[in-house]
Image: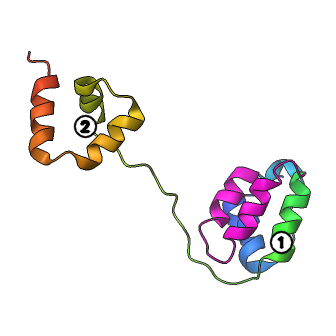
């Protein structure tokens, strides 16, 4: 029977210290590393596991289990990228790539963006 990553596996590392990993397939390194990287006391552990990604899942779990102190931590929500509504318009107007258009959005004023929106909008 598969164990739940968020209800059993992560709490076993962070709070309960009850060893629950039976099948290595239940351990998802990317998700565990990402969740632990949001806490200041475990970010260095997550960085170390990112560096040693080739280790078997059991060893990664054991590293976290035995090295992170048990304590109640708040639930960290994943950081989501900002949605840039004006990015396609700036790309089209200047002929920029995504990276250059994002940099341009940082310095463009609202008046300049209005002009760009009007120039790049296709009238019906």
Name the colouring of the figure.
rainbow
90 magenta-colored: no
**Among all residues in the image, which is located at the extreme top?**
124
The residue where tag 1 is placed is: 65
Question: Between residues 10 and 37, which one lies in front from this camera angle?
Answer: 37
Magenta-highlighted stretch: main secondary structure?
Answer: helix
Q: Quadrant of residue 93?
A: top left
Describe the element under mark 2 as helix, strand or loop. loop
Identify the residue at horizontal 72%, vertical 61% (top origin).
47
* Position of residue 20 in the picture relative to residue 72 (left or right): right
Question: Can I make out residue 39 in this image?
Answer: yes
The residue where tag 2 is placed is: 86
Identify the residue at horizontal 69%, vertical 72% (top origin).
42
First-in-chain label (2 vs 1): 1
Question: Between residues 46 and 69, which one lies in front from this camera angle?
Answer: 46
In the image, is residue 17 above or below residue 76?
A: below
Q: Which residues are magenta?
A: 28-55
Percent coordinates x, y for residue 76 in the rendering: 54, 67
In the image, is residue 40 above or below residue 124?
A: below
Percent coordinates x, y for residue 94 in the rendering: 25, 26
Disc number placed over residue 31 in the picture, else none? none
Q: Quadrant of residue 21?
A: bottom right
Identify the residue at horizontal 91%, vertical 59% (top origin).
59
Percent coordinates x, y for residue 9 in the rendering: 76, 64
Percent coordinates x, y for residue 1 in the rendering: 84, 52
Q: Residues within 10 Å of mark 1 (few under 14, many from 20)?
A: many
């Amino acid at each position: 029977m598969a164990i739940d990553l968020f209800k059993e596996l992560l709490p076993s590392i962070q709070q309960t210290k009850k060893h629950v990993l039976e099948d290595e397939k239940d351990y998802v390194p990317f998700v565990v590393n990402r969740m632990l990287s949001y806490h200041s006391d475990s970010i260095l552990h997550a960085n170390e596991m990112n560096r040693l990604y080739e280790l078997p899942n059991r060893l990664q779990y054991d590293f976290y289990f035995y090295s992170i102190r048990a304590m109640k931590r708040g639930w960290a929500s994943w950081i989501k990228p900002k949605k840039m509504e004006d990015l396609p318009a700036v790309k089209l107007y200047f002929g920029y790539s995504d990276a250059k258009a994002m940099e341009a959005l940082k310095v463009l004023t609202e008046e300049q963006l209005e002009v760009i929106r009007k120039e790049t909008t296709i009238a019906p």
